[in-house]
Image (cartoon, rainbow, N blue to C red):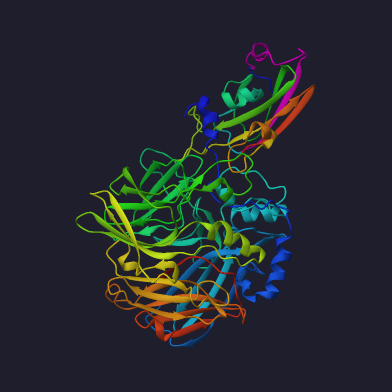
Amino acid sequence: MKTNRLISACLLAAALGIYTRAAADTLTIVIEDIRDASGAVQVQVLAGQAQFEGGGAVAQFLEQAVEGTLTITAEDLPPGEYAIRIMHDVNGNDELDANFVGMPTEPYAFSNNARGMFGPATWEDARFVLEGEVTQVISLVH
Amino acid sequence: MKRREFSKLLALLACPWPAGALAQAGDADWSTQFAQALEEFPWLAAWGNIDRDRYASDAAVSGRWPEELRGTLYRTGPAGHEVFGYRNHHWFDGDGMMHAYRIGGGGVRHEARLVETAKLKAERAAGRALYPGLAAAPPGAAGLTGPDDLNLANTSVLHHHGRLLALWEAGSPYEIDPDDLSTVGPYSFAEPGGGLSMRGVPFSAHPRVDADGSVWNFGYASAAGLLVFWHIGADGSLRNAGRVAVDPMTMPHDFVVTERHLVLLLPPFHYRPQANATGFLNMHQWRPEDPCRVLVVDKNDLSSHFFLELPAQWVFHFGNAWEDSAGVIRFDAARAPDPSIMTETFTEIMRGNPDYGRAARHHAYRLDTRARTISEEAMLEPEIFTEFPSIDPRVSCRQYRKLVFLSQNESSPAEHGTLNEVNLFDIESGRRDWFRYPDTQIPEEHLYVPRPGSEPESEGWILGSVFDWRQGKQVLNLFDAERVADGPVAAAELPYAIPLGLHGKFVRG
């Protein structure tokens, strides 16, 4: 289990001003079905619908890929509603490769293993409440 | 594309496939409704279900199967209409089944096998229907990662450079072993120049084979608002690919190719994404007050294009097209006033409600690429409805004068109410040579098969199957293309009937 490069989570959350208490909670993210040890796995923890739809992340992790499962722990996050977005940059070109019509050709996933119906996964599909200790087990979409 | 664009990219994820008034899943038991209706209308068996994954039998032949007619008629179509008790809510949502009618030595052997798509495998592993279709979603439907999650490989066939592909409308072709009809898997054409991946890029069901043996096709990516164009060499490799942004997107099913251009009709069936849609058709809106856009693309520069307009109309299928030295294109199409046959008829039939929508009449179009004008006129008498146009493959994308199609005469409909005649129509003379099937038989697509060594459109046969609902048998019929009214010159009768399929290709050899 690794804890890595939690980027200014509390600071960002404070700046967003959307949390009512400052207790530190722990989010464990278990990423499954990593089929290739090449490249890097990027994980974004998104605080609220605004970040999910607008950009930015309350915490961001960059891990060397391993075949199988990767576990990441985000500590000291304020309780609240979050979503997670994951991509596996298999060829290490610092891009999420896409096909001719813009659909990703590298693995990705959302919290709750959310998938869209006839469109992308929505905030409603991907959101979860962090209070105390929460574990999200997420399988990459290939 | 940089990481910060990740979410923007993901926003493009969507499924361009296939509904009207939306039937919520779990609503009344469609299987029961269909079974009840079948008692009253036995011909509805043509939209029934398969009872096994594979079929194989030597056919009982009659008449004279010509010695020089050797080869295989490959056909696909929606066949698996019930998934673990859930009856699909649209004809086109059935799991695809590939057929091979192997003809030679005076005999005919038939084999058919379900295409093992990712969807079929996932649903069998789960033990239930998982995925939404055109008109509805089963209870507890799974979310989607892209169009290929729904790929049914059930619409048409391409046999190119020795490779047999089962085609769907909005996803990858599925490669099929031509000998035992087993499923190899989704097929991806090679990367084009520029290094962009074509994996999972939609490849529509009606590619056109050009005079040089190369293949043209298009695909629509609804959420991305893009039409994609494919050009595949005679050697099977991807020669070129292009994109044209279309707003609003629609659902083009077929297109035509001339000496210099690709032509698509874009009916005003506008893509309108909705977060909670459970079927693909209901993400579209028919706007009869809007024009049918006509997109004309330069074959030599896929980024070069222009739009023209026609009155609102719906076209599934074109016959052929050609272009003269003055840049005037002529083409033909089975033209319906609206898409109700798809949005209503093909949904209602699945619960045994034979309520036919507005059918297609055959039209001839004249498109002047220099003056940038287009006009259309009816090709046949107004009481003749048509569908499934086909041509002598030797005149594909070139000047032509003969069309094969199925029809129905509005003044004398069959008991089953759908198409019941096979035709060879001479565009120049206006002569229509046709044969009417008995009411107990519903014809499937009929194809023109050239007689080896003959001149184009001079000698050949018309080959096509019928669903005989009274006998519970499929029958493959062969006509002399020059004497259609005489009826079949040979027939091959199977000991079983498989639900109505869609399109096929005859492969010599």
- Specify the farthest residue to the bottom: B63
Residue sitting at 71 percent across and 52 percent down?
B126
**Which of the 4 quarters of the picture holds residue B53?**
bottom right
Where residue B366 sits in the image (x, y, percent)? 29, 58
Who is closer to the viewer here, B293 or B116? Answer: B293
The front one of B409 and B469 is: B409
Instruction: Kindly indicate the quadrant of the structure image that contains residue B227.
Output: top left
Residue B263, magenta (yes or no): no
Residue A51 percent location from the top left of the image: 61, 23
- Counting from the top left corner in percent of width and height, residue B197 is at 44, 41
Q: In this view, does B365 lie to the left or right of B439?
A: left
Q: Nearer the viewer, residue A127 or B27?
A: B27
Q: In this view, does B508 lie above or below B300?
A: below
In the rendered image, residue B45, in percent from the top left (x then y), is placed at 63, 72
Q: Give the range drawn in magenta.
A: A6-34
Magenta-drawn stretch contains A11: yes
**Image height of B291 relative to B31, above or below:** above
Residue at the (33%, 63%) spot, across then down: B396
Instruction: Report the residue that reaches farthest toward the left.
Output: B325
B459 left or right, relative to A135: left
Residue A76 in sight from this viewpoint: yes
> In the picture shown, does residue B480 fall above or below A74?
below
Query: In this view, which residue lies farthest toward the right?
Result: A132
Residue at image x 31%, y 68%? B394
**In the displayed structure, does residue B284 sit left or right of residue B399?**
right
**For the C terminus of chain B, which image quadrant?**
bottom left
Report which quarter residue B143 is drawn in: top right
How many marks are shown on the rendered structure? 0
Work out whether residue B115 can be spotted.
Answer: no
